[in-house]
Amino acid sequence: MNNVTRYNFIIYGLKKADFTRFDQIFLEKISENLIADGIEQSLIQKYMHHASEATFTQTSDRSIISQLNDMIYLARYDMDNNIRQIGVEELNQINRLSNQYPMSKLPQIFPRDAMQHALENLSMVNT
């Protein structure tokens, strides 16, 4: 989950060997998810140009931890109750839904909209 936009997605089916190139996989998957969420290709390319590696940090921000837990709960619920088999299409459906849940801490309310806003501002600042 992105701390600023709360944009989130699940990467499914990773194997032990995948973690040696996790930065690359992460950037590929975030690009795929942004495309699936209807973000303009030019904004994604600008983002990928500036994103040299994925950064993971610990947080003690209770609102972020709470929202992470909510997304995990909702994804599990969707997997357990709405999806018979987990495959690429089903996972894409869960990833689309997870960024349509309202987050009251965001000015744009929805993570997908907050991510688009952040990418638009990135493109203006770093043109």
Image (cartoon, helix red, strand yellow):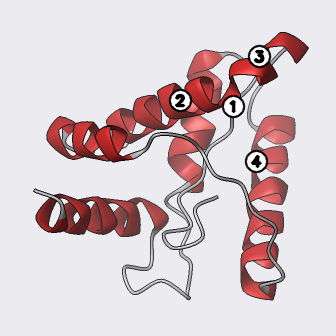
Residue 86 visible in image = no
Q: Mark 4 or mark 2, which is nearer the start of the sequence?
A: 2
In terms of secondary structure, where does tag 1 sit? loop
Q: Nearer the viewer, mark 3 or mark 1?
A: 3
Looking at the picture, which amino acid does disc 4 mark? Answer: Ala
Q: Quadrant of residue 19?
A: top right
Between tags 4 and 3, which lies in front? 3
Q: Position of residue 93 (x, y in %)?
A: 56, 35
Residue at the image point whose x is 84% and y is 46% from the top: 76
- Indicate the secondary structure of the residue bearing disc 3: helix
Q: Which residue is mark 2?
A: 29
Q: Callout 3, which amino acid?
A: Asp
Comes first in the chain, label 4 or label 3 = 3
- Identify whether 109 is placed above or below 24: below
Labelled pair 2, 1 in contact (Cβ < 8 Å)? yes
Label 2 to label 1: alpha-carbon separation:
7 Å
Q: Which residue is mark 3?
A: 18
Mark before the other along the chain sequence, 3 or 2: 3
Task: Please say if 90 is above or below 105.
Answer: above
| Label 2: which secondary element | helix
Image location of residue 24, percent across then percent down: 57, 25
Q: Which mark is residue 75?
A: 4
> Would residue 113 be found to the left or right of residue 81 on screen?
left
Q: Is residue 8 left or right of residue 120?
A: right
Residue 25 in picture, x, y percent from top left: 60, 24
Q: Which residue is mark 1?
A: 11
- The quadrant in which the N terminus is found is bottom right
Mark drawn on residue 124: none
Query: Identity of the amino acid at label 2?
Result: Lys
